[in-house]
Image (spheres, rainbow, N blue to C red):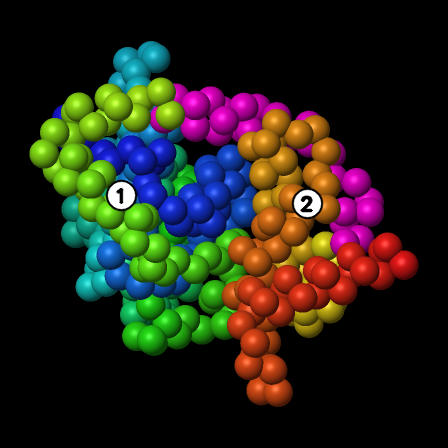
């Protein structure tokens, strides 16, 4: 069995790790878009989180061999991690219907695609900004509905496809359409570390893992168990976390101040704030939780202001400071 790099051993990239943990607690948030440099541990972090999570019942997992998941009562499987390649065809993504077999034998012959295999886990798309728009549209629709429908010549097959969608890309290589980017729940930015000690620590950990992966994983076993307990606690407590009216007012006022279109921004602020509070073991969402998730929830939803070249993160932080000053006064 292949050993994955421990999630807890990833150096830095705190915002990306926090966003992934939030999405793991509440998949309704709508996935995570990661912008940044190559070689900064984006796919490593997603794969590590999938490996960290407890096995799921086989009945809740994705298609494994062309057939719906089956197994003995109580049988489990690892949380799926599916990497979607850029050149994937629509049939490979959604699945294919064998019309010849259906017409000759009278049965629906369905070859599951990547969406079926990702059910119950994570679907990762590197350089999602280079993926064909119709495929991205399809992925986002399925991620939102939790169901995949394949229709060919009057035949149709539908199956559950609930997964956390994670996309990554470098804006310098092509931008994602704003209306598609808006449908990702959270957006984070990762950069190559410039701190010398941090870079050296990354090298040491990568080297240790490559040489003795089992021993390295064992070293981080305690930290991994702590993270796993935090996720389990967050999932269990999520439904009981209260979002007070004053926090909802703060979220709405922030979205108005930033000129965010629609209500997706507010909904994401509310849901991600609640998930973060659950991860923290808090019973109530506070302004601090909203301030923490605001850049992740809003930076990709802002209109570009030609008169203000300030980065989106700075604009959000500035708006939060102005709102805080209003509340004090």
Using the rendered image of the protein, determine whether residue 45 is visible from the camera's viewpoint.
yes
Task: State left or right for residue 204 relative to residue 14.
Answer: left
* Quarter placement of the C terminus: bottom right
Secondary structure of the magenta portion, mostly?
Answer: helix
Q: Name the residue under label 2.
A: 288
Which residue sits at x=26%, y=43%? 201
Instruction: Tell me, yes or no, whether the two marked residues, 2 and 1, touch with CB atoms within 8 Å.
Output: no
Q: How many marks?
A: 2
The answer to if 4 sits in the magenta stretch is no
- In the orientation shown, which residue stands out farthest toward the front? 197
Report the quarter where the N terminus lies: top left
Q: Mark 1 points at which residue?
A: 201
Q: Is residue 252 left or right of residue 105?
A: right
Q: Which residues, given as a range, are shown in magenta?
A: 224-250
Residue 144 seen:
no
Q: Quick one: SS at disc 2?
A: helix
Mark 2–mark 1 Cα distance, whole angstroms, equals 31 Å
Tell me if residue 236 is in the magenta stretch: yes
> Up-down: is 263 above or below 70?
below
How packed is label 2: few (under 14 Cα within 10 Å), some, or many (20 or more)?
few
The residue positioned farthest toward the bottom in the image shown: 307
């Amino acid at each position: 069995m292949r050993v994955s790099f421990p999630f807890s051993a990833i150096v830095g990239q705190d915002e990306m790790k926090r966003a992934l943990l939030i999405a793991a607690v509440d998949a309704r948030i709508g996935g995570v878009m990661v912008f940044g440099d190559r070689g900064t541990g984006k796919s490593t972090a997603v794969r590590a989180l999938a490996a960290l999570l407890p096995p799921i019942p086989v009945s809740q997992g994705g298609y494994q061999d062309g057939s719906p998941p089956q197994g003995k009562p109580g049988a489990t499987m690892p949380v799926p991690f599916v990497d979607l390649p850029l050149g994937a065809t629509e049939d490979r993504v959604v699945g294919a219907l064998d019309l010849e077999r259906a017409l000759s034998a009278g049965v629906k012959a369905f070859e599951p695609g990547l969406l079926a295999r990702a059910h119950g886990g994570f679907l990762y798309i590197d350089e999602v900004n280079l993926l064909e728009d119709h495929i991205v549209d399809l992925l986002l629709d399925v991620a939102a509905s939790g169901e995949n429908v394949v229709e060919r010549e009057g035949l149709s097959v539908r199956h559950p496809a609930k997964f956390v969608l994670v996309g990554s890309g470098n804006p310098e290589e092509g931008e994602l359409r704003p209306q598609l980017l808006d449908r990702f729940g959270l957006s984070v930015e990762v950069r190559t570390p410039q701190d010398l000690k941090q870079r050296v620590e990354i090298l040491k950990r990568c080297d240790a893992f490559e040489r003795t992966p089992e021993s390295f994983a064992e070293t981080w076993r305690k930290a991994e168990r702590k993270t796993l307990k935090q996720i389990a606690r967050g999932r269990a407590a999520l439904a009981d976390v209260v979002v007070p009216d004053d926090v909802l007012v703060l979220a709405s006022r922030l979205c108005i101040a930033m000129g965010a279109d629609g209500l997706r921004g507010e909904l994401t602020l509310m849901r991600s704030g609640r998930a973060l509070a659950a991860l923290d073991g808090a019973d109530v969402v506070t302004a601090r939780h909203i301030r923490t998730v605001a850049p992740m929830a809003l930076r990709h939803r802002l209109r570009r202001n030609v008169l203000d070249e300030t980065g989106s993160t700075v604009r959000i932080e500035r708006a939060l400071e102005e709102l805080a000053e209003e509340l004090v006064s």
